[in-house]
Amino acid sequence: MLYPDFGSEIPCPQCHRPIPALILTDAYLCDRHGLFELTPANHHLVHLQSGRIWQRYQNQWYRQHTHPDGLILEIGQGLDLAYCQGWQVIQIAIAARYQDLLYPYLDDQGQLFGLRLEFNPDLATTNFELVKQPRIPKDLLNFNESGFSQT
């Protein structure tokens, strides 16, 4: 009972370095990012300086967005990472709790970043998932039997 519910140490939600719990409190202190307070009722971790909210799922921290800009930025970073890893994203599944938040930012076809969206009620903690398929490098698209075509 000396430590908060997550124990004596957790990874910082922002920098992922181990941070200690403060004894007899519901708080954790990161020397880089400051104080995080655990809300025991719903197990959210709140960064006291910024008000950002985090939730833990399968030993990962997921930011719970209250403004569309943060969520759109996070999705954009996920798209960039997928592309760099050799994937083509064909659809974005976003947690249904963000539908009202994102609706004004969708294009006329109801897309974001030119991709089809699905608002998924099963994404309880995670914010979104990318539906991916392997990407064919452009160099291979111009390849024919005798070698590369001159286009």
Image (cartoon, rainbow, N blue to C red):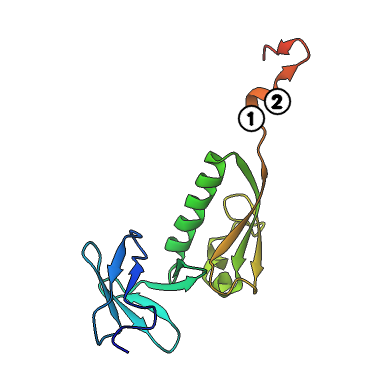
Q: Secondary structure at mark 1?
A: loop
**Quadrant assignment, res 16:** bottom left
Disc sitting over residue 137 in the figure: 1
Q: Secondary structure at mark 2?
A: helix
47 in relation to 86, above or below? below
Q: Residue at point 61% right, 72% down? A: 96
Front position in the image: 51 or 115: 51
Q: Are marks 1 and 2 in contact (CB under 8 Å)?
A: yes
Left or right: residue 74 compared with residue 142 = left
Q: CA distance from mark 1 to mark 2?
A: 7 Å
Under mark 2, the amino acid is: Leu
On the image, the x and y values in percent for residue 36 come to: 30, 74
**Quadrant assignment, res 106:** bottom right
On the image, the x and y values in percent for residue 145 come to: 78, 14
Left or right: residue 34 compared with residue 151 = left
On the image, the x and y values in percent for residue 67 come to: 43, 69
On the image, the x and y values in percent for residue 129 come to: 60, 60
Q: Residue at point 53% right, 72% down? A: 125
Left or right: residue 71 compared with residue 142 = left
Q: Residue at point 35% right, 81% down? A: 38
Q: Quadrant of the C terminus?
A: top right
Q: Residue at point 61% right, 42% down? A: 87
Q: Quadrant of the N terminus?
A: bottom left
> Label 1: how many residues lie within 10 Å, few (<14), some (14-19) or many (20+)?
few
Q: Residue furthest left?
A: 31
Under mark 1, the amino acid is: Pro
> Label 2: how many residues lie within 10 Å, few (<14), some (14-19) or many (20+)?
few
133 in relation to 131, above or below? above
Q: Which residue is mark 2?
A: 141
Front position in the image: 98 or 14: 14
